[in-house]
Image: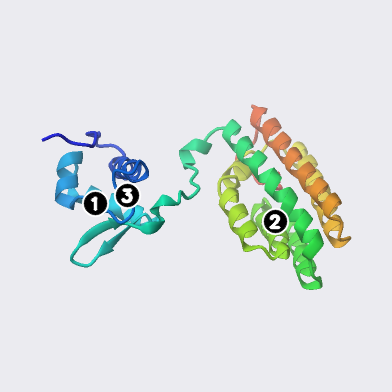
Amino acid sequence: MMTMFRKIPARALTDSVAEQLLEKIEDGMFPRGAKLPTEAVLSEEFGVSRTVIREAIARLKYEGLVESRQGSGVFVTEQAGIHPLRIDYTDVGTLESVLQIVELRRSIEAEVAAQAARRRTDATMANIDAALARIDAEVAAGGDGVDADVGFHRAIAEATGNPYFLKTLAFLSQYLETATRVTRTNEARREDFSRQVREEHQAIVAAIRAGDPDAARNAAQNHMYNAARRLSQLGEDDSAAGDQPAGPSH
């Protein structure tokens, strides 16, 4: 019997099956509303167990691409034609890829800061101030300040009143957090970087407080440019301390 799928090795079975099924959905072989082959058929065509097929289907369900209908089978959803943004963790395993995400984030952070300057209220401004203070407190307590840093940028995004800024930045930040934590170097340079980050954060806050969108945009752009520079410098430092605590680089 002619098969439409490629036989795959034992490794990464679930990923491979899910990816191939996704390809067939995206290229129209299984259009919206179409029923997928049964577990038995897919198991035979892929040459894998039904457990692997169920796990792959579960992954597609989680992403909203397919749905089960009681007694009828698994069908491609109507939203399957909408392609969600995905970044595979294996794609961000290099300094170059991390810097590319920082570049993407820079353009978003700049507009977030500008809109926060336009729309901030006394309450959201107080949240930003408190978030900034938490970074210093976390570092003073011996932490790396990364969690507080994420909270600071989230507070600025909340001040825009636009939930999609929040969702987009949260999506991007998850790929940068590990790099921020592990890309550390000797104590002197970490202290120098912490001072730079503190000053950049203060410039963003001052511009938002003043209600100056242009200054806020410029301060945020400068901050993200410098974040990329710091990551590059730390990545090139062979004497880096690795996982020792340090202040955030962004």
Pointer 1 residue: 36
Q: Is residue 122 above or below residue 234?
A: below
Pointer 2 residue: 153
Q: Amino acid at mark 1?
A: Leu
Rounded to the nearest whole Å, what is the CA distance between mark 3 and mark 1?
10 Å
How many marks the image carries: the answer is 3
For image coordinates 29% across by 53% down, the residue present is 57
For image coordinates 14% across by 34% down, the residue present is 2
Q: Is residue 25 above or below residue 209?
A: above
Q: Is residue 73 left or right of residue 134?
A: left
Q: Which mark is residue 170?
A: none
Q: Position of residue 210 (x, y in %)?
A: 89, 60
Pointer 3 residue: 31
Rounded to the nearest whole Å, what is the CA distance between mark 2 and mark 3?
40 Å
For image coordinates 71% across by 47% down, the residue present is 247
Residue furthest bottom as drawn = 123
Rounded to the nearest whole Å, what is the CA distance between mark 2 and mark 1?
43 Å
